[in-house]
Image: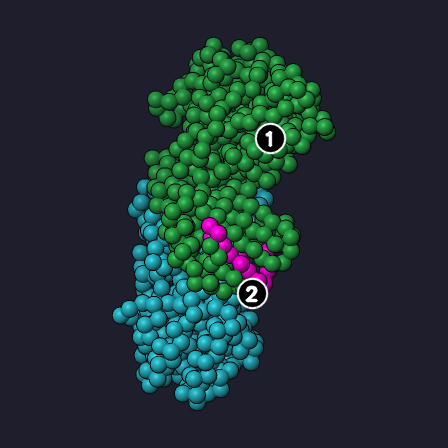
Chain colours: A green, B cyan
Amino acid sequence: MPLKKNELLIPRGYLFSTARAGIKYQGRDDMGLIFSERPAAVAGVFTRNRVKAAPVVITRRRLQRGTGRAILVNSGNANACTGEQGFRDALLLSRELSRRLNIREGEVLLASTGVIGTPLPVDRMRNALSELTDGLKREGLKAIARAIMTTDTFEKYYSTRFRVGKTDVTLSGVAKGAGMIAPQMATMLSFVLTDAALSPETLKAALKEVVDDTFNCITVDGDMSTNDTVLIMANAASGAASIGKRYYRQFRDALYEVLDSLSRMIASDGEGATRLVTILVQEAKTRADAKRAALCIANSPLVKTAVYGRDANWGRIMAALGRSGARFRQERVKIMINNVEVVKGGLSTGRDDEAGRSMEENEEVVIHISLGEGKESSRVYTCDLTEEYIRINAEYRT
Amino acid sequence: MPLKKNELLIPRGYLFSTARAGIKYQGRDDMGLIFSERPAAVAGVFTRNRVKAAPVVITRRRLQRGTGRAILVNSGNANACTGEQGFRDALLLSRELSRRLNIREGEVLLASTGVIGTPLPVDRMRNALSELTDGLKREGLKAIARAIMTTDTFEKYYSTRFRVGKTDVTLSGVAKGAGMIAPQMATMLSFVLTDAALSPETLKAALKEVVDDTFNCITVDGDMSTNDTVLIMANAASGAASIGKRYYRQFRDALYEVLDSLSRMIASDGEGATRLVTILVQEAKTRADAKRAALCIANSPLVKTAVYGRDANWGRIMAALGRSGARFRQERVKIMINNVEVVKGGLSTGRDDEAGRSMEENEEVVIHISLGEGKESSRVYTCDLTEEYIRINAEYRT
């Protein structure tokens, strides 16, 4: 169920390359390099898992400087739970890359995704570095989106453009998702690039604000990875004025558009998914209540299998709502599935079959719960749960 | 994977019957009646879901009296989210039954399991009441275990016997589980009967203590039902002395034996399960840390699908541990799968294949995590996650 793709625009001042190191997958690129021709402001958000992969620990530390030049990424191996060796391997690669690019080592940011607990095939990866640095070119962001895929079925990218004064600036993002997807962070990896000019502080504030409403509101299986990384670079290559308070809102809205689109793509490409599912909880007493309820429903295996069966089984939605911890009175609950009201005043309206048909006929399923308790709302993207999820995850390593 | 069955002993002073009301299933009994020939002490624990079925609300209230005579149960319809009508239906059945049994209405306890949101076929159920009251007989507890099944693949019962002074007392339990199984409460329905003599207060204390370590430590899918009910009756028909402080420990141990066995049966019969999985977290700083970690690992779809794939994918165990909120240092973690050490000091021992074979060859999988932080431990039963779970739950209503 690929979502409508938009054109992938390349922000000014960035170069890209990918290479085939044979880390795990055969016959495809599995390493990628993003390079900013000039120093860029950088910010990031990371997994909150207590178990963090080596590249996460290293990159988080390097972000404190606020500027960077390069992102080196690989798929097929997470470099997580690899101990001291994992750190040495990651540092070796970043040192070698910085030498080749003639930048400081602290300007190299790292991200890995793949199997946990297996040492990096660091010699093969090191050999691929020359291909990466020699192959840098302006067109190549789409190849990065492909090189970071693991169980993803399509590459995920999204671009937008907006004006700062009289100058056009571009904002583009790539992402990978598929499994082990839940807040916080919701996505395994995402890289967002802009040629706008921002201070590292503004960039960080905008990223945090937008991620909370986008990547942190998607879930496939409730599992949280050791490697989740979102990095944003702003290299000012557009020549536009700096995004201060004056253009903050525009920048934030553009960033929301990009990250929201990537979030929907990630949820729709959840392992084995056949439907993108939006859970919208409204009229909650507090925002926390709304988010708690939306996440609990989104993560319920019974709700997700019912969507797969195109069964408007609102009893399971009600049961998940009831265990979520959100405050509500059953007799005020209203539930709509793809705009068909199936529950009113906490009771069946008898329109289950109609709602089931709408699930059959639409590419997306929107479950809309109204609690009648207040004014707060929350929205979470997820997907249905299918036999294919089981097959993918029972056989992933073998 | 049926666990070893033991003999089903019938405690003195109880009668049983089942009937075919055609509530949802065809060609099988779907109603059951448990009757104590004399007033019995009763206690119960119930779902903590905010959405509670009518029988849960009614029975919880009736337990305040501390004594009861009859349990009326049905499968095929949960009588949840059925509004005022659901309460009227439940009360109609209990009133009618009390009249037929010549007991007070408040002595009738109710439990239902099945589809949510559909009104009870109350006329058909009412018609079955005479069959139930006319058919009461001493042998028939096993038929109750069968009548309460929904997606269960085998009936669940367990008995034990112990001495109070020179008198033998019997303790027997039946249960149903399969799906929508998670603390609190872990099981959909369980009824435990004894001919020992206990005050309602002692009975309640023992039940709560034991349920916390048994039914509240199993999870199939993390979903919590609207109907979960555990009821225990003690009718003193053995003639043994009252279980006061003197015999409390023996009673509690016997109750633990029964509920622990039923818990293992429920987890092993999780929808579509091929393996009973025990998650044992030891050497945690606090008991809460241990339980949090064990439950998080037990509920991880990625861990559960790895078990199904017989893949000793300890990276997923580590990732679930890392997001659980439990305090630990990665470099102290030890993980054993069926006694094969796969992680030591937070790192791979390279014995994954050996562990995978042991998962293939054994009926059960024990995942043993040692945190090296303290002395507390917790144990949770769960099962693997298979395509069959998806099929059962995508097609349950259709």
Q: Is residue A18 above or below residue A113?
A: above
The residue where tag 1 is placed is A254
Quick one: SS at disc 1? Answer: helix
Q: Nearer the viewer, residue A256 or A183?
A: A256
Disc 1 or 2, which lies upstream in sequence?
A: 1
Q: Residue furthest left?
A: B27
Point out the image quarter for the N terminus of chain A: top left
Residue at 37% from the left image edge and 26% from the top image edge: A25
Q: Nearer the viewer, residue B75 or A94?
A: B75
Task: Provide the secondary structure element on which disc 2 rests.
Answer: helix
- Of the 4 image quadrants, the one containing the C terminus of chain A is top left
Q: Which residues are magenta?
A: A320-339
Q: Position of residue A222 (x, y in %)?
A: 49, 45
Residue B148 in percent (x, y) is at 37, 69
Q: Quadrant of residue A313?
A: bottom left
Q: Residue at x 38, y 47 (%)?
A: A361
Q: Residue at x 53, y 27 (%)?
A: A159
